[in-house]
Amino acid sequence: MFESMVEPISIRGHTLLCLQGFRGEGYDATFIDRLTEIHKTLSDDPARLVQVVQAPDALCSYCPNLTLDRCELNGADSEVEMKAQDADVMRRLEIGTGEILSWQEIFNRIGTRLKGNDLNEICGHCRWLPLGYCSEGIEKLNNRVRS
């Protein structure tokens, strides 16, 4: 079987869920542009490989809340919180740190193993959670995967 020569996209565990609800909003124009690019790449090519990590990823490098090599979105302890969210999502999806999977495989796992209301437990302090975007995205995914 021919393997793609394109490097996998590095994505944090919890960001796999954020991508389900992305609607072109974010922290600043640069961040939104990068998230849009990653979202489009994965949507257009479900075979695209993704390396799932518990650290700042391909998107975080464009976030205005990244300081040095850690997230400071909610203060000095944000990276600890983000890693805990990453670990929770990865455990639920049965993905190991650094594991490389196709976006389609990740998509299928999210669609069969998570529900929109699981985000209340996983993402409790996320400022985007009350908007319901990610929950709606996961519910749509559930319906698509089960159809």
Image (spheres, rainbow, N blue to C red):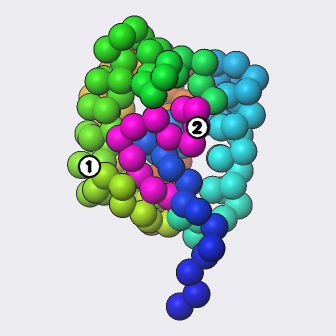
Q: Can you identify the residue that label 2 sits on?
A: 59
Kind of residue at badge 2 = Leu
Mark 2 vs mark 1, foreground winner is: 2
Residue at 63% of width from left, 30% of height from top?
62
Q: Give the quarter of the image for residue 4.
A: bottom right
Residue 28 on image: x %, y %: 70, 19
Horizontally, residue 55 falls left or right of residue 144, namely: left
Kind of residue at badge 1 = Arg
Q: Which residues are magenta?
A: 50-61
Residue at 41% of width from left, 52% of height from top?
52
Note whether 56 is above or below 10 in the view shown: above
Residue 76 in magenta? no
Residue at 28% of width from left, 56% of height from top?
96
Q: CA distance from mark 2 to mark 1?
A: 22 Å
Residue 127 on image: x %, y %: 47, 15
Q: 144 and 58: which one is in front?
A: 58
Mark found first going from the N terminus, 2 or 1: 2
Note whether 99 is above or below 138 in the view shown: below
Q: Can you identify the residue that label 1 sits on?
A: 92
Residue 44 on image: x %, y %: 71, 61
